[in-house]
Image: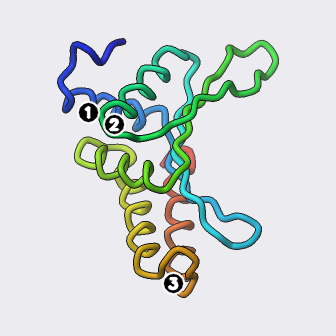
Amino acid sequence: MSFSNMTMLEGIAYVAGFIDGEGCFMLKQNKRGFFQPLVTCCNTNKFVLERTQEFLLTTSCIAAKLYESSRDGNRKRLWRLDILDHTSIEKLCLLLRPYSVVKREQLDCLLRFFEIRRVEGRNGNFLLNDKLAIHASIKILNKRGN
């Protein structure tokens, strides 16, 4: 798999499809009640994740970290690509939204979260009910079979 033979739009569409199939958009709540968005994509093929990481960084300045997940018994080695910082996640959501099919609702939820965050400021929590509703929506959308 190589992005070098693709146009930028083809590459973005490929990444959208790849994340639709292998990725997950989450909004986690920590013990102090703050919400942390997270985008993760897992695969046994490290090369595909490395190329995806490189493409996102070079074309859109989206920072992603590649991790080796723990192995379970005789299973293949699993690699995980995480996008953790808010700016990169918001850029990714805006970039992939036109091409996303399966994860479009999760993308929309995270984009609503970022809108709320802008309204209330970095340390605000006066729109907590809105954030809780988004958190619940993403959780339901991410259940297997949905």
- Image marks 3 and 2: residues in contact by CB distance under 8 Å: no
Which label was assigned to residue 16? 2
Is 53 drawn above or below residue 111 in the view shown? above
In space, the residues marked 1 and 3 are separated at their CA atoms by: 33 Å
Visual colour scheme: rainbow
Neighbor class of circle 1 (other Cα within 10 Å; few <14, some 14-19, many 20+) is some
Residue at 17%, 24% in the rendered image: 7
Q: Residue at the location (41% across, 74% down)?
A: 118
Element type where label 3 sits in the image: loop
Three-letter amino acid code at the position of disc 3: Leu
Q: Label 1 is placed on what type of residue?
A: Ala
Above or below, comparing residue 137 to residue 37 in the picture? below
Task: Return the x and y of residue 91 as percentages of the image width and height.
Answer: 35, 50
Residue type of the residue flagged with mark 2: Ala
Most foreground residue, 96 or 123: 123
Residue matched to label 3: 127
Q: Which residue is mark 1?
A: 13
Disc on the earlier residue, 1 or 3: 1
